[in-house]
Amino acid sequence: MALDALSHVPSTSGFDAGPEVLAQIHHWRAEALAQMGKSREADSERARAASAIAAVRQALPSRDQQTFLLRRDFRTYSVN
């Protein structure tokens, strides 16, 4: 049920989700898939979350890139 709801967030919410929101969606989809025992799909979602966060970070001025990942919410989604 959670997985289905997360699959439709951008299309049903009436707004264009930015990369930060998409990273959160991918993270929670990964968690749901992992709980279902679908590790391959969960890994794919984790990679998508990390990619979205990496794109945001790279778009920042270089002076802000290091501190960006200090945000607690993004440390979870980024690649260690």
Image (cartoon, rainbow, N blue to C red):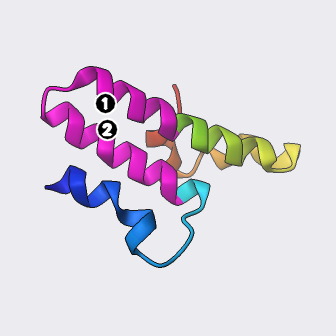
Q: Nearer the viewer, residue 7 or 45?
A: 7
Can you identify the residue that label 1 sits on?
A: 42
Crowding at dot 1, Cα within 10 Å, few <14 / some 14-19 / many 20+, comes out as: many
Q: Residue furthest bottom?
A: 14
Residue 6 in picture, x, y percent from top left: 31, 56
Residue 23 in picture, x, y percent from top left: 49, 49
Rendered view: 59 above or below 9: above
Q: Residue at x 69, y 48 (%)?
A: 56
Is residue 14 among what the camera can see? yes
Q: Does residue 9 appear to the left or right of 62 in the view shown?
A: left
Count of numbered badges drawn on the protein: 2
Rendered view: 32 above or below 22: above
Q: Which image quadrant is residue 35 in? A: top left
Residue 27 in picture, x, y percent from top left: 38, 44
Labels 1 and 2 touching (C-beta < 8 A)? yes
**SS class, disc 2:** helix
Can you identify the residue that label 2 sits on?
A: 30
Q: Does residue 62 appear to the left or right of 13 in the view shown?
A: right
Task: Give the quadrant of the N terminus.
Answer: bottom left
Q: Residue at x 56, y 56 (%)?
A: 20
Q: Residue at x 40, y 35 (%)?
A: 45
* Magenta highlight range: 21-49
| Sequence-wise first label, 1 or 2 | 2
